[in-house]
Amino acid sequence: MAQIAGNLQRIKNGQRRYAITPRIPAGFIQPDQLQKYIEVANTFGAVLKLTGSQRIMITNLKAEDVDKAWEMLGMEPAHTVSNRVRSVKICPGTTFCKRAKQDSVKLGMQIERKYISKEMPSKMKIGVSGCPNSCSESVMKDVGVIGTIEGWNVYAGGSGGAHPRIGDFIASVTTEKETLALVDRIIEFYKANAQIERMGEFIERIGLEAFKHAVLDGFDGAIVGETSSTNAFGVAPNGGYAMANNTAANNTAAKNNNDPVVNLPPGRGNDPEVAVPRLEPGTPITENTIIRDIVDTYPSVVPVLQSIGMGCLGCPSATAEPLWQAAEIHGVNVYDLVQKLEDARKGA
């Protein structure tokens, strides 16, 4: 079956509904393009939803209407891979805002043009804010940049979701050119060395100091002040209180210490009191195997998971979600999926 250029939203009474989220750089949209969104919604009975990434999602589309909707918009689907740079959120900056200290629109658009939809180990979100008010929530992005009177503060490893994490402060630089260069070093180092994991997980796995040494050593730019190991809120590299009781973080730490790790899948056919051991190499995949364990232990089977629409394999939910639950969400038979994964695992 041909791949549908939309994201599966839900399955109700056997009916699948999809969403498309066209790219709107910096959230600025012309009236004529906005009118096309309205026409698509009226034509297909769709719903328009403003997203947190400064875009307009068109949802409740039938599969057969997805391509027609893109055609009416006069746009091509922005993404070709699931794990990619999803968005660059940009505040109004000095272009429109009286409080701004730096031109976040100019810098953000340069970052947008260079990185949007680029393939990454996991999904990536970037934020660019023109002042410390951080309307783009830059410290909650995988890569964040915040304008100051002196220049720009650069952060890495922030995320929201089930396991929120405040980004780690990396360095302060003075010029736009230096900021772009540092962002490039951060992204390239992550892309070359990370597994299927978000930026924050990658930093926790290798350690903040190792990460900072990798991106700052040999950096051809002026670093302002000390590159402290705490972020803008004075929170320790692991996110402090936000990560203290985080099961995923504890599992990662235990894994690094070679301690046995267990995951507790949600109920429904599984006893929530019985731990599921971490998947070891050579062990068969079952309907109860945790998605994160499959990805970590058998990366060669990842295309099978992606083929059923599982795009966010680096999402926090994958850390504890059993295969049967993912299959149910995506409307596929879990036992057929297990067979395909086993065939791929064995090299069939």
Image (cartoon, rainbow, N blue to C red):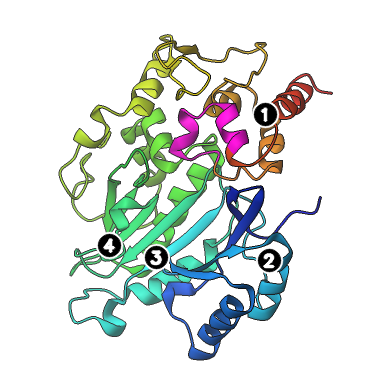
Dot 1, how many residues are within 10 Å of its Cα: few (below 14), some (14-19), or many (20+)?
some
Question: In whole angstroms, how far apart are the C-alphas of marks 2 and 1?
Answer: 26 Å
Label at residue 89: 3
Q: Nearer the viewer, mark 3 or mark 2?
A: 2
> Which residue is the site of mark 1?
334
**Residue 13, x across and y down, in percent:** 62, 48
Q: Decide if residue 278 is on the left or right side of residue 119.
A: left
Indicate which disc, 2 or 4, sits on the residue closer to the N terminus. 2
Question: In whole angstroms, how far apart are the C-alphas of marks 3 and 1?
Answer: 37 Å
* Closer to us: 346 or 57: 57
User: Which amino acid, by three-letter code, is at mark 1?
Assistant: Val
Indicate which disc, 3 or 1, sits on the residue closer to the N terminus. 3
Q: Residue at x 40, y 49 (%)?
A: 142
SS label for mark 3: strand
**Mark 1 and 4 residues: CB-CB less than 8 Å, in contact?**
no
Question: In whole angstroms, how far apart are the C-alphas of marks 1 and 4?
Answer: 45 Å
SS label for mark 1: helix
User: Residue 345's image quarter?
Assistant: top right
What range of the chain is rendered magenta?
A: 313-328
